Amino acid sequence: MTDPPVPSNPIRIANCSGFYGDRLSAAAEMVTGGPIDALTGDWLAELTMLILARTRERRPGGGYAVTFLRQMEQVLGPCLDRCIKVVTNAGGLDPTGCAEALAGIAHRIGVAPTIAVVTGDDLIDRLDELADVLMPFGDGERLELDGVVTANAYLGCWGIVEALTGGADIVITGRVTDAAVVCGPAAWHHGWARDNWDALAGAVVAGHVIECGAQATGGNYSFFTEIADLTHAGFPWAEVAHDGSSVIGKHDGTGGEVSIGTVTSQLLYEITGPRYLGPDVTARFDTVSLSDAGPDRVRIHTVGGEPPPPTLKVATNAQGGFRNDMAIALTGLDIEAKAELVERAFWAACPHEPGDFAKVTARLVRTDKDDPATNEQAVALWRLSVKDPDERKVGRAVSNAMIELALSTIPGMFSVGGGPSAGTPYGVYRPALVPAGLVPQYVIIGGASPIVVESSAPSAPKVPDVGLDADPREPRASNDGIGTTEGVSERVPLGTVVGARSGDKGADANVGVFARNDESWRWLDGFLTTDRLRALLPETAELAVERFRFPLIRSLNFVIHGLLEEGVAASTRQDPQAKGLGEWLRARLVDVPTSLLTERRKY
């Protein structure tokens, strides 16, 4: 056993990966660029689990993120020399295999780290056993399990804490929450109890901010033009204090920026309402306060925590069938007439009727411009997606029907993309819930016998809403006109005065919108209602939309249900992960009070 460091000192936890495929040099940059106590990274998403499952089918042993091993080969020696703990979810579907591969690398370079593995999240072999207790995440009484290829519960931080307490230098997990790889080292370092809700919630918020790597240091930031250097943004770290407050920063001299704006933007990424549910704690995002702590330093504080729910979220991916996606260029004049003819001619040539497929999606995408100065500016797209369980139905017969039209229908027609193709498989994401008590964590340190860590959290009375709105989804009642466009105003893009961050939440999408001063916030709060959002984003008009308020960080968050169909892998949208949804919203013209345009950057 090793004793944790003195708990009165903050622990600096660095990130070196926001997704599977992120910058390979990031680990070395974080280890050599400045002092850190722990190195973490996030390699997993719902789609990643499906990708790993397909990789494992093609290549046994391919169920983990191999890029993690390449990073560790660069920094393993320095991490051990400097007592830097490494915690990662790169184990994916095979954390044991990942640990064995890392041990082989360590042996080859002449070091001997103590490697721990945390498992228990993979429920694929327990689906029959759990079928009667697995609940859909949302409507419905029973989860559809046909064709499921991955089923992983989101575990919390206490298996990681156990591994670090037991002397692990490196902890490799499967599907833990994105924030758990930060919350675990913080809870171990400070010796937190499992019911220290506020401290745990603070660490979860810090983990949420840095888990996507450079998104906290200026990446994907609406006001990127105000950042001096984004050619090679530094990765972030969180310095977590004993009370759960934290300072977000980056190594001195690195590119990018850490500001209240970049941190606010990342706080809004892929969330729903004020209560951010997790396996260890429910973090109250509507209690989060931010303050400037110096150049490239932002302090997060006043975070409130509540007990977690009695269930764990489970991410399941199922085989959805096969699809074929095609795009035809429509050039110049008569775009709508050309689209109508191509669609009519295609179905006349296709051996199947539209109703024969499980799903057909056709869109006319008007990317063309009047009086086009280039050939590309003259082009619109007609996009077609067909899906069906039968691979042959959506394969070459469909592609060939489209190719047949090349010389017999519209002028200027050409295909965008490759030639005729077979159908490709796609997955369907189905979130679920399982009682936490049925999913313990198993911690194996250096090949020893497994240690069982219960996933159920201690219960406690619900923390009251202290001075907060009873229903943060509703706009603030106001008759002062601040949220209207009455008086002197100018018609400008909404993004002139507000920023946004958007992303995917399974089949849903979120759009967080934030103001940068109190005056803009009061206007935004009254102006951007759900009805206004639907008017600005017509694709959401028929969908259920929820609106949540975060006054302390001058932000609104909208959850748009069903925009991404059956999840990222099945979506037929051009932007299947909704990454550009917020920027589309910012591009829409609205009437903004002139007074808000005189000084746009003021925190």
Image (cartoon, rainbow, N blue to C red):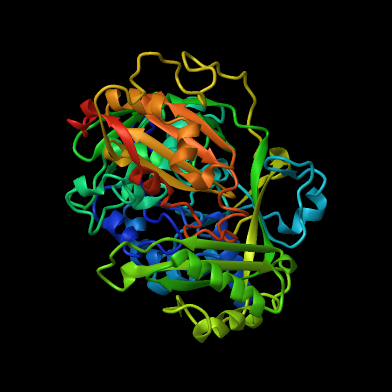
Is 140 in front, or is 64?
A: 140
Residue 566 vs 37, above or below: the answer is: below
Is 479 in front, or is 348?
A: 348
Q: Quadrant of the C terminus?
A: top left
Is 386 in front, or is 490?
A: 490
| Residue 203 figure quarter | top left
How far from the left and from the top, in percent, is residue 223? 26, 44
Left or right: residue 295 compared with residue 153: left
How far from the left and from the top, in percent, is residue 225? 21, 49
Residue 456 vs 76, above or below: the answer is: above
How far from the left and from the top, in percent, is residue 108? 42, 74
- Identified at 64% across, 64% down, the residue is 360
- Identified at 32% across, 59% down, the residue is 26
Left or right: residue 410 compared with residue 260: right
Residue 143 vs 275, above or below: the answer is: below
How far from the left and from the top, in percent, is residue 455? 65, 40
Left or right: residue 60 compared with residue 68: right
- Identified at 57% across, 85% down, the residue is 404
Left or right: residue 226 compared with residue 398: left
Is residue 404 in view from this perspective? yes
- Identified at 67% across, 62% down, the residue is 359
Is residue 92 in view from this perspective? no
In this rendering, the count of numbered labels is 0
